[in-house]
Amino acid sequence: MQVPLLDLKAQYAKIKDDVLKAIGEVLDSQICIGGPKVAELEKQVAAVSNCKFAVGVSSGTDALLASLMSLDIGSGDEVITTPFTFFATAGCITRVGAKPVFVDIDPKTYNINPLLIEKAITKNTKAIMPVHLFGQMADMDPVMDIAGKHNLYVIEDAAQSISSTYKGKKAGSVGTCGCFSFFPSKNLGGIGDGGMVVTNDEKLYHMLYIMRNHGSEPKYYHKFIGGNFRLDPIQAAALLVKLPYLDEWSQARRKNAEYYNKKFSGTVVETPFISKDCVTIYNQYVIKVSHRDNLMEYLKKQNVGCEIYYPVPMHLQECFKYLGFKKGDFPESEKAAKEVLALPVYPELTDEMKTFVSETILKFVK
Ligand SMILES: *Cc1c(COP(=O)(O)O)cnc(C)c1O
């Protein structure tokens, strides 16, 4: 049996006609930049996120970048974030000329450990960028308390967590703004790159709105230096078809996760810890095992898709050598990088597939 980590064809088969029709509408209109599909998606994603405003952008990476630029974070500034994340989080901080200041993770949730944040604050700190990893939101109450006390922005990297909740609050609605990615493998994935920033701050919304279009307002008058961060209307059209299914798909992922949790309970396979404050959307279902690399090799041989998110923490990336970090600086992130493994959890997994994945793993660990 073959079980891929993700099967986008299975999802597409169910919505193909609607997606093609929606794309056709964009093409017939020949409104190829911006337009009603982008505006409608912004309205709907803002609503889903319990936010007043949303700005469609070209990717999750550009959502982070445009947020930093719109908050005027740059040279000489520091942004506190986690080293256990996708590259874009730290990459964007450095691209605006600011310095990423890493804080280790809580080993249970893999999210930033709020107890370690305050020690990392200096007079140059401008923002905290928590990442809601694998679909579960970071512990936001202490993050917001610290930010309030030190007058810092909070940019939520919610690229993996659209519509997940913390104490009933939606991802993206807690901080100054929240950044989503519509990369095809994300829970709400486009048919190419796309992203969005949500916020309740009208002034920031206005800045984001003009920054995605080279900072111009009115056209050809540039008070700010922005970029081309626009969301493609064809992406918006496809995403409008998919968005109504998001809750159903998240529910199916949670059901699949529960199945694995039961199967692995009482074994050496450590299942995901989900805080009682959170409802996760399982963008990834990540187990922790000590002989991870051997298990991975075994699973690949048995045609079970799996992946390491992420094998090298940011402080040990070659491009960040100049920051002067060394092995051992963030032990929990380093340990996680050696032990985590993501398993197939996508909504269309069949019972046979789930059984095969879990039985194969149990065979290996026994
Ligand atoms: C996917 C992802 C991004 C970047 O999103 P893109 O749409 O691929 O640019 C940023 N941060 C995290 C945590 C991600 O998972």
Image (cartoon, rainbow, N blue to C red):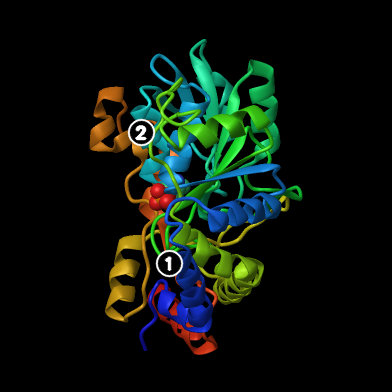
Give the mark count. 2
Some atom of ligand 1 lies within 8 Å of the CB belonging to the residue at label 1: no
Q: Give the label on residue 126, or none.
A: none
Residue contact at pointers 2 and 1, CB within 8 angstroms: no
Which residue in the rendered view is the most extreme toward the right? 168
318 or 227: nearer the viewer: 227
Q: Quadrant of residue 273?
A: bottom right
User: In percent of the image, x 46 and y 20: which residue is there?
Assistant: 223
Q: Is residue 282 above or below residue 159?
A: below
Question: Percent position (x, y) of residue 291?
Answer: 35, 62
Question: Which marked residue is nearer to the observer: mark 2 or mark 1?
Answer: 1
Label 2 CA crowd tier, 10 Å (few <14, some 14–19, many 20+): few
Work out whether residue 125 or residue 291 is closer to the camera in this orientation and state it: 125
User: Circle 1: is it few (<14), some (14-19), or many (20+) Cα within 10 Å?
Assistant: few
Give the residue drawn at x 47%, y 22%.
73
Residue 65 visible in the picture: yes
- Name the residue: 31% across, 62% down: 293
The location of residue 63, given as percent across then percent down, is 47, 41
Location of residue 171 with respect to 274 vertically, above or below: above
For marks 2 and 1 on the same chain, the one whose residue lies earlier in the sequence? 1
Residue 327 sits in which quadrant?
top left
109 or 362, which lies in front? 109
Residue wearing tag 2: 328
- Indicate the secondary structure of the residue bearing disc 2: loop
Q: Which mark is residue 27?
A: 1
* Element under disc 1: helix
